[in-house]
Image (tube, rainbow, N blue to C red):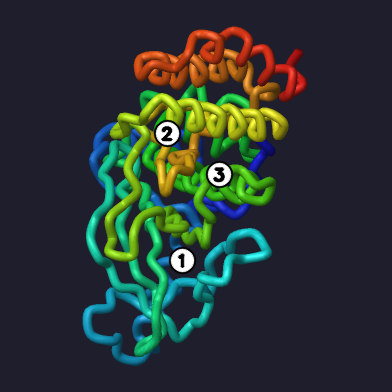
Amino acid sequence: MQEHDFDAYLDFEDQAERSAPRRRRRARARIDDELQPTRSGRLTEAERERLARVRDDAEAAPELPPGAARWSTWDGAEHGPRPRPDWVITALAAADTELGILKTGKEADVYLLERAIPGQPGCLLAAKRYRAGEHRMFHRDAGYLEGRRMRRSREMRAIANRTSFGRNLIAEQWAVAEFNALSRLWTIGAPVPYPVQREGTELLMEYLGTEDGDAAPRLAQQRPEPDELVALWHQLTAALELMAIEGLTHGDLSAFNVLVQDGQLMLIDLPQVVDVVANPRGVEYLRRDVRNITEWFVARGLPAHLADEELLVEELLAAAGAR
């Protein structure tokens, strides 16, 4: 994965700390990061600016339509790749209404949201919101963050030490990483939901499901007939090859983060996408992805001549230029 420039994510106390005596800096670090581990932590500058905009917009905005949670956050957000699908609503006069929760997880929760201009048809979106730093689980971070580097050594130290500031940086980094991965993969035609926008640690993306709000089922919930199983396998291997051509592997692939909508596979949960070449453990992650998904298909009856795990790994590595 390409390096992300997080120069905008500066600690608002950075300048003050540079000029403070060493003893004072150490004392503050102990208070911030050891004696108060459950506090919310220092916000990144980008998040402070975003919250200030939200507050200012709320004070200046007209009254919301009944049931709406907020006005559209399109203005000021990072937008998805062009050409945008026709269903994406970019009008600032649109309002967002929350319709319920789709999924809870250790790192993020996903909500169903409708964005619409009052009195007009709207579109359904999946709102993925990464949790605040003190609530997240970081046991999986280290390996995935290999190959991703920030340019400021202070930020790298904060992440390595899991300080309050570092945890907030990681939460933002996951959101940025998933948005960038979805944008990149959607652009090359990979079966992923369209990333509509990212603001802070919230990612809005294409909702996969029915108009009534029933989410598309996960592959793990499926019991496909033999012909359907083979068709799904070919779809999946084609998607993995597309990713490999870009030098990527999913990083956490299983039947639980693949959706099936109208017979079509869609890959989801992509914040941990791994660059097979840049990440020292890239080949290991690719092999694990292939092993996990192959085992599921074999358990459902995939013919042995198709379920050649080692052959698939070698084909993907060759496509990624790692062979």
In this rendered view, identify the residue nearer to me: 279 or 16.
279
Location of the C terminus by quadrant is top right
Please rate how many residues cluster around mark 3, counting C-alpha atoms within 10 Å: few if below 14, some from 14 to 19, many from 20. Answer: many
User: What percent of the width, then of the height, locates residue 230?
Assistant: 49, 26
Location of the N terminus by quadrant is top right
Residue at which label 3 appears:
191
User: What percent of the width, then of the height, locates residue 317?
Assistant: 69, 17
Please rate how many residues cluster around mark 2, counting C-alpha atoms within 10 Å: few if below 14, some from 14 to 19, many from 20. Answer: few
Residue at which label 2 appears:
26
Give me the residue at 74% from left, 18% from top: 318
In space, the residues marked 1 and 3 are separated at their CA atoms by 31 Å
In space, the residues marked 2 and 1 are separated at their CA atoms by 29 Å
In this rendering, would 14 be left or right of 224?
right
User: What percent of the width, then of the height, locates residue 13?
Assistant: 48, 52
Q: Determine the secondary structure under disc 3.
A: loop
Q: Earlier in the sequence, mark 1 or mark 3?
A: 1
Q: Determine the secondary structure under disc 2.
A: helix
Instruction: Check contact, mark 1 vs mark 3: CB within 8 A.
Output: no
Q: Earlier in the sequence, mark 2 or mark 1?
A: 2
In the displayed structure, 202 sits above or below 98; it is above
Residue at which label 1 appears:
50
Give me the residue at 28% from left, 39% from top: 105
Badge 3 amino acid? Pro
Q: Determine the secondary structure under disc 1.
A: helix
Task: Answer with the quarter of the image where residue 81 lies.
Answer: bottom right
Badge 2 amino acid? Arg
Depth check, mark 1 against mark 3: the one in front is: 3
Give me the residue at 50% from left, 75% from top: 89
Is residue 14 visible in the rendered structure shown here? no
